[in-house]
């Protein structure tokens, strides 16, 4: 679905709402005080090891090219997403990714749910299937 799916044209207002939700959640969880940003890819194992040994959320800003988010916005979203993995004890398989999606939509407006599904579940499914991250895009499914 993600790989062959058509990239959605989205309004600037929708993107602004998504960025605002990211910003609010990032600050609501006080993640700014517990993250360390590095210029590399950070694997789930590295992120978890860093968290368990130092209590610091290690977030990589490599491959942060995104059609709608700045690098800083993308880093905040990655930190929030990783925080959901940690706080839920969710794995990094498709079940764990779906669990983090369910956590994210608890605070997101309903009109952003499809964006979160694309960013979390569909993107992860494509990565799991191919072994590498695909170019980022927003794909709307018939679910939403």
Image (cartoon, helix red, strand yellow):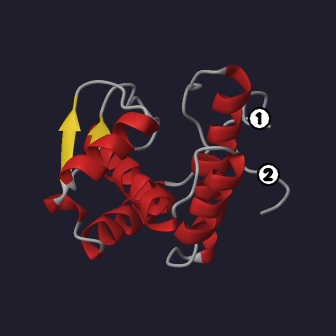
- Whether residue 119 sits left or right of residue 61 in the image: it is right
Q: Is tag 2's residue or tag 1's residue first in the polypeptide sequence? A: 1
- Horizontal relation, residue 12 to residue 36: left or right: right
Q: Quadrant of the N terminus?
A: top right
Indicate whether 100 appears above or below 136: below
Q: Quadrant of the C terminus?
A: bottom right
Label 2 vs label 1: CA separation?
8 Å
Secondary element at image label 2: loop
Q: How many marks?
A: 2
The residue tagged 1 is 5
- Along the line of sight, which residue is nearer the eye, 43 or 134? 43
Q: Could you tell me residue 60's position as x and y percent?
A: 31, 34
The reply to whether residue 52 is in sight is yes
Tell me residue 21's x, y (percent). 40, 68
Crowding around mark 1 (Cα neighbors within 10 Å: few <14, some 14 to 19, many 20+) is few
Residue displayed at 56% across by 70% down: 103
In this figure, which residue is indicated by the disc labeled 2? Answer: 141
In the displayed structure, 81 sits above or below 6; it is below
Q: Is residue 125 above or below residue 115?
A: above
Crowd band around label 2 with a 10 angstrom C-alpha radius: few (<14), some (14–19), many (20+): some
Q: Are marks 2 and 1 in contact (CB under 8 Å)?
A: yes
Residue at (62, 75) in percent of width and height = 110
* Element under disc 1: loop
């Amino acid at each position: 679905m993600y790989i062959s799916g058509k990239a959605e044209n989205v309004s600037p207002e929708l993107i602004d709402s998504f960025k605002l939700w990211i910003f609010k959640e990032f600050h609501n969880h006080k993640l700014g005080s517990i993250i360390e940003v590095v210029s590399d890819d950070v694997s789930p194992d590295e992120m978890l090891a860093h968290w368990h040994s130092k209590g610091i959320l290690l977030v990589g800003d490599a491959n942060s090219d995104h059609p709608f988010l700045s690098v800083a916005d993308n880093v905040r979203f990655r930190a929030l997403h990783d925080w959901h993995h940690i706080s839920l004890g969710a794995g990094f398989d498709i079940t764990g990714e779906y669990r983090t999606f369910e956590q994210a939509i608890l605070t997101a407006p309903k009109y952003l749910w499809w964006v979160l599904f694309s960013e979390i579940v569909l993107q992860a499914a494509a990565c799991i299937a191919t072994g590498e991250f695909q170019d980022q895009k927003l794909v709307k499914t018939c679910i939403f």
